[in-house]
């Protein structure tokens, strides 16, 4: 199911540099539900230390059709039910692109993978 997020603070992220939660504005289209979005945002926020920025202030999401992912691609998920997305995160004024993959766990919940840097040759969202 595809969710559209409009100018909403999707999650409060606790960063190691700040004691107070940080609101992140998420816009765009994603296949993740609100719980999975929060999990993905927490993983993306972990990269903040590498960018000398505690957390992203905004994220633009876009869906990538699975048909655009080559079957031999190393970034392809081990599931035929996977979703692929591009998340563009603003870390202190600088955009960083992340390749997000998530797929259902047969036992409940989801598996997710956050790839940075964006894989060479991977398609971008629309």
Image (cartoon, rainbow, N blue to C red):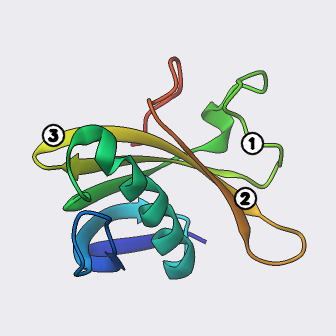
The residues tagged by marks 2 and 3 sit, at their Cα atoms, a distance apart of 29 Å
Q: Decide if residue 108 is on the left or right side of residue 6.
A: right
Q: Which residue is mark 2?
A: 103
Q: Is residue 122 above or below residue 47?
A: above
Q: Earlier in the sequence, mark 1 or mark 2?
A: 1
The answer to whether residue 7 of the structure is visible from this angle is: no
Q: Nearer the viewer, residue 48 or 108?
A: 48
User: What residue is disc 1 on?
Assistant: 77
Secondary element type, mark 1: loop
Residue closer to the observer: 20 or 118: 20
Mark on residue 94? Answer: 3
Q: Determine the residue positioned at 31% across, 47% down.
A: 49
| Label number found at residue 11 | none
The answer to whether residue 98 is left or right of residue 96 is: right
Residue at screen point 54% across, 80% down: 35
Residue 48, image x, y percentages: 30, 49
Res 98 quadrant in image: top left
SS under mark 3? strand
């Amino acid at each position: 199911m595809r969710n559209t997020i409009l100018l909403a603070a999707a999650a409060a992220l606790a960063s190691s540099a700040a004691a107070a939660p940080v609101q992140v504005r998420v816009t765009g289209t994603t296949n993740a539900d609100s719980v999975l979005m929060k999990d993905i945002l927490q993983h993306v926020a972990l990269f903040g230390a590498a960018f000398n920025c505690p957390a992203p202030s905004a994220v633009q999401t876009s869906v990538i059709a699975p048909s655009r992912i080559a079957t031999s691609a190393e970034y392809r998920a081990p599931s035929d039910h996977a979703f692929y997305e591009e998340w563009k995160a603003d870390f202190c004024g600088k955009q960083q692109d992340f390749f997000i993959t998530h797929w259902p766990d047969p036992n409940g919940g989801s598996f997710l993978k956050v790839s940075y840097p964006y894989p060479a040759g991977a398609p971008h969202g629309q």
